[in-house]
Amino acid sequence: MSKKIDNKGITVEKDEFTEWFTQIMLKADLADYTEVSGCIVFKPTAYEMWENIRDIVDEGYGQLGIRNAYFPLFIPEKFLNKEKEHVKGFSPEVAWVTQAGNTKLNERLAVRPTSETIMYPSISKWIRSYRDLPLKLNQWNNVVRWEFKNPVPFLRTREFLWSEGHTAFATQKEAEAEGKDIIELYDGVCREIMALPSLIGRKTEKEKFAGAEYTISMEFYMPNGKAIQGPDFHHDGQKFAKAYGVQFVDKNEKKQYVYQNTFAITTRMLGVMFAVHSDDKGLIMPPMVAPNTVAIIPIFDDKSKKQVLKEAEKIADALEDFGVIYDDREYYRPGFKFNEYEMKGIPLRIEIGKRDLETNSAVVVRRDNGKKESVKIGKLKKYVEETLENIQDNLLKKAEKLLKGAVVSISSFKELESAIKNKKISLTNLCSSVKCEEDLKHKTEGAKVLNIDEKKKVSGKCIICSKKAEYVARVAKSY
Amino acid sequence: MSKKIDNKGITVEKDEFTEWFTQIMLKADLADYTEVSGCIVFKPTAYEMWENIRDIVDEGYGQLGIRNAYFPLFIPEKFLNKEKEHVKGFSPEVAWVTQAGNTKLNERLAVRPTSETIMYPSISKWIRSYRDLPLKLNQWNNVVRWEFKNPVPFLRTREFLWSEGHTAFATQKEAEAEGKDIIELYDGVCREIMALPSLIGRKTEKEKFAGAEYTISMEFYMPNGKAIQGPDFHHDGQKFAKAYGVQFVDKNEKKQYVYQNTFAITTRMLGVMFAVHSDDKGLIMPPMVAPNTVAIIPIFDDKSKKQVLKEAEKIADALEDFGVIYDDREYYRPGFKFNEYEMKGIPLRIEIGKRDLETNSAVVVRRDNGKKESVKIGKLKKYVEETLENIQDNLLKKAEKLLKGAVVSISSFKELESAIKNKKISLTNLCSSVKCEEDLKHKTEGAKVLNIDEKKKVSGKCIICSKKAEYVARVAKSY
């Protein structure tokens, strides 16, 4: 699994996506392969971005009254088996603990692929009356899904990190209303922080979460022309409540089952973010998520050293709040450092040498578009602040353009085939039969329904069976 | 495993420690048992305290240049086996994944009991030259040690949460110097935030971490008279470096092995904190770690409702920064709420009723000593701030008194036996032989050396073999 890293830049263009993405990951120091197939190391820069995302999502959860908790990693097999659609969906991918020390366990333990089946037996004990509702919990943890498809760092790893929210309500109405808040929160974090727009909609029956009544998903578009699913929200109705006996006594002293939701955002989003924004020079980080947004590189010779370092340090102090890397290492030449911070996607680079000091200026270089500008030192702080905002906007706009350009309307199967060949997301009339969806996948050699564009009014026929279409589905090849 | 919770207060006194501790955990809503033997649910209040501790430790790590990363949960068996003392120490407690879906794995995977053996093969690839050093990493994660001893919630659980720091240096001197910083950080967090003093010292050869050159531990004293180990720091020398080939090219272009440290703080500390501070009325939380420090309870009848709620809400707004619980639920009586917040350990309770408003006052009740005071509303904020500081100090002082009173000097084996019977920590002359330590444990029916009091000069004879004593050991029954 080990890959050799050379010290050159990215040696392939973004078109050769898989190799390009691997090089970004390794050369920008984001992650590394390990000897555990399908599991990666999240190196500090990538992990710190995840922490930034976590903190922002967490604040949003707090405002919605969702509190963090921690449930066991292990799920007894009998618990996993209680909700039959759920177990069918997950059991092929479960990693099983069968032994502890030298002792064979009496009952196998699943390493959680998701935590419904370990949480709900507890919740069923805690909820007694309507006064205990709503109960809103979240956990930030690691889950394992031993997929046998080809793993891809960040995008499909056998272990990944996520937030999993689990809420229980007295009424269906309250439960469903939460969907809007959660998707709004996730969409805000994706757009405003990660600069990633998405296509939001309901999943089809075939593609919904195993055990849910319905799923709302956010679908993203990757620069290799594939779609990829991001955060999602599942309304579970009373399915799990009935399987796990999660009941409460209502105001009329009647026993009722709760209505439940689950929702999640995962480290996959880091991969989507790296893929969408970066270029042939390496990583591009949106400033809002970057652990460091400015790299300051003093340029000096023996004669100018003292004066340049003095000024450069002052600038570093003044810009401290932006997360500054101050690089005065003498065993690397400035050109080496320029390449390094380009590769690592630091949003702004500030070069300061003797000649700049003569005009009381510094040179600021943007990572996103390469533009250079000489800026008076007195105006630097304001310039940096505004330029970082501008970079953030710019990345979102570019990503929006990419996404918008990918979505096409099609009106025949032939047009669908051609759109798929051209790596587009097709707005496609479909009926709701699982059979048609399976046929579509088969006939297109693997394209699938991402989700339903619920804002589009449907008229006309299902593109597969020619019966009345029931919705406009977004169809594409997808991770 | 499931325990029935009644709605009464704590029904046993702190003397009956095990039952008392269990009731605190369940009735103060800190944790719950699960069907996975030895694993608990960390409920929101306990988990949020852990998050508070995490954030403070994390800030300290940042100041020491330690960055967070995330390595896989699973460790291939061949990796675990490379450092022979380490594997001997951990393999009896390893949970093994042997199967994924329906497929038997070619090689068993250990669920990490600690991450040296998965991290160091990666680190050995990343470190090339002295310029890559020091490398300082930490991860916040879950680990599993399938102990067959009786599990105790928080104090000994098969899965627990922790921070594990792993650092590599070019020289032994630098590596060892880090020990002081790390212990200072942990000691600061334990004392200033958790109000928990400890006995700090080096572990004996017998008790040191499996694979370390030496271990510095922090030992705490529990109200049931048992000692318990808290955070620790291990200097690993070059042991792991040699087992995992972690080498660098030094300034003279010679290949050298790095010097490594590992250190950790775990969720066990929550249990120590709950046990040391709490009383027969329930939990007592130090204000510095409490997610909420003030509970405001308006007291009203139909006639006074409007006026009282208006004033109480104003107070709640003014005290917002302290993490206020504002409880205007009408289906519970004030007395019920008083008991609830006493049980849950909220440091301050503020009662506000019509009669208080007449004198423009509110009643403030301290959880730690039950003292009540009527305070003018205009002075409330300052009073709350000062009182919380005073509670924090008071808890530390009480804990210091408890610990100080537990430590005794002994000069004969008979005195040692009597001290152990009286649940003391004995300062005991010992030679450094493992045999004597084993004899001591056997003869005392289970007391052990916690660590060495390095500030005490030793003179005289080993209490076991009567040869020359080499150090003053702290001896007690321990978790």
Image (cartoon, coloured by chain):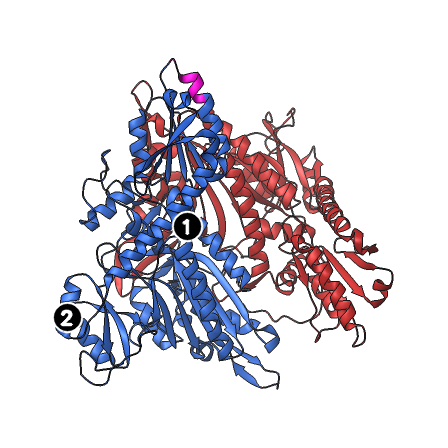
Chain colours: A red, B blue
Question: Where does the magenta region start and end?
Answer: B303-309
Q: Chain of mark 1?
A: B
B426 in the magenta segment = no
Q: How far across and down, in percent of the image, does residue B145 sit?
A: 33, 61
Disc marking residue B415: 2
Q: Judge if badges 2 and 1 mark residues of a common chain.
A: yes
For label 2, the SS is helix
Nearest the eye: A310 or A219: A310
Q: How far across and down, in percent of the image, does residue B292 sit?
A: 42, 40
Mark 2 to mark 1: distance in Å?
40 Å
Residue at numbered disc 1: B50
Disc marking residue A352: none
Which quadrant of the structure image shows residue B130? bottom right
Question: Dots 2 and 1: beta carbons under 8 Å?
Answer: no
Specify whether A368 is left or right of B207: right
Mark 2 vs 1, N-terminal side: 1
Q: Residues within 10 Å of mark 2 (few under 14, many from 20)?
A: some
Magenta-drawn stretch, dominant element (helix, strand or loop): helix
Q: How far across and down, in percent of the image, does residue A365 sit?
A: 78, 57
Q: Amino acid at mark 2?
A: Glu
Q: For the point 51% across and 42% down, which residue is it? A: A58
